[in-house]
Amino acid sequence: MWTTLAAAGPKAIAEALTAEEFDRLHVPTSIETFVAQQVAEGRSVILTGNAGDGKTHILRRIRPALEAAGAQVLSDATALMRGDDPTPVLDAWRGALRAGRPFCMAANEYPLFQLRTVKEGFEQLAEVERQCRHRLAYGTNSADEDARSDVIVVDLSLRNPLAANFFSRLVDTLLNDSALRRLINVDRDTIAARNHALLSIPSVRERLAFLMARLLSVGHRATVRELWILAARLIFGTSGQRDYQRSDWYSETLFAADARFDLTVAMRDVDPARCSHPQWDVVLESRGEPIRSGWAATPPAPAPHSLLDEENFAALKRRFYFEHRDGHHAFALADPDAQDFSKLLSGGSNGQLASQLITAINAAYCPVRFSGSEDHLYLWNGHRFHEQPSRSFLAACRIAIDRFSVDVPRLPSRLTGCFEYQPDHIALSVPSLANNPKLRIDFPLYRTLKRLGRGLPRKLIPERDIHKLDAFLERLGKADDSGVRTIWSVHLENLDVIQISLSADGKRYDGVKRYA
């Protein structure tokens, strides 16, 4: 089973597994207990998310408990639908409700969207729609986080399997598989036995989990399916050869790109071989004294040449990271913005963060500092909408910094204890405004804002980030409740800022001030 999984493609499905194989792949988590408890209390549960997130797996695993509680279980909403017509699913749900039974269903995002369009006469679907619009919570607890009827939506796309605890349990499940252990005991002189032994070392596992956590913090995610395939490859490699080819070392397999899997491409972002550390790189190249001892397993063989070629140095650098006591230094000089962002996501405080973010957003439209530019966010608009890119901007409104809040997301209270949620963004918002408009700041946007604070020109801002900032300012403008008393105008070519003060009735100019 494991060798087949190591060779699997991205379309491998859980339905193809036998009952025995299904049990061997099961990673116990709190979500099974949560769903079973909700159903036992009479609630219907909708599991949604992306293909490969584990919806079918979870329902299949706890189906006996659900049925024992009287629930009607639908493992795949798509299979029951007629094209885009959700009527068969709705009929099944209505039938369960008429019989006084909870309804349990797994549905990918699109089938669930089709169901959400049908709200009239179905109280539960209106609640499904509300919960789907508020999948995460920010700030202090509120009553809006509670379920308002007897239905709970669990979005498994919020459960990132790259989270350290889940990934560690998954690898443990693989390493402790009895059939795999028997295979290794038969012949310990294989690449599988070698990889199994090294991955069983606690320090190696800790550093592997650290890489996954770094991927998560900068915005990458993976499906459970991808992780199982990757984990199997860490043991058996990718070539299928029973020898010691370097390409099948776990430390090389981890960074072997496969265009079919987004995860293997993303791994390049956390490859120790791509992170330079001049002092340790010199020591590794020369096999200096600091690395002649301190290895968790067998030290590398002596260098065959005075200088290593690129591939051999990369392999040594990766092994150093995983297996040497000082390997964590490989990332000591990693992107400081990524390190700062990771700290923010873990709850690290930064009292100046709101001010820094607002100053950076202003700089995206107006690089000239002027009175009030660090204390307010100005709602900039392109002076000419047909002019692309805009060379001038106007702001007729501004919002004081003390009205802003910066929050790390969490699961709403209705999902407490469901699964481990690891945030991948922070949110800048104005709670006092209608609908509390939010700017979702993921790592790419955070990096752009930090660079703006260091003087990044507007022309170098990624288009994706410009669109997000424009949309946020537009939402703030629609919700802003302050009147227009001053107009600010900036021209990006001559870097002039003009501040125009209006009279109380807005009918005349009271003053003009120029900043350059």
Image (cartoon, helix red, strand yellow):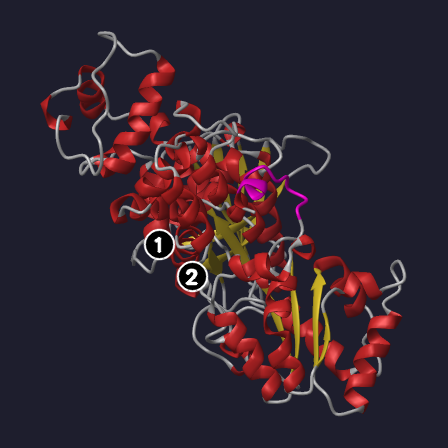
The residue pinned by badge 1 equals: 344
Secondary structure beneath disc 2? loop
Give the extent of the magenta segment: 3-12
Residue drawn at the location 48% of the way across and 58% of the way down: 427
Side of 313 where 88 appears, left or right: right
**287 versus 43 height, above or below:** above
Between discs 1 and 2, the one toward the N terminus: 1
Say whether marks 1 and 2 touch (CB < 8 Å).
Answer: yes
The kind of residue tagged 1 is: Leu
Label 2 Cα crowd, 10 Å radius (few <14 / some 14-19 / many 20+): many
Residue 194: x %, y % from top left? 34, 36
* Disc on res. 408: 2
From the viewer's side, name the closer residue of 176 and 167: 176
Residue 475: x %, y % from top left? 62, 57
Label 1 Cα crowd, 10 Å radius (few <14 / some 14-19 / many 20+): many
Side of 189 where 290 appears, left or right: left
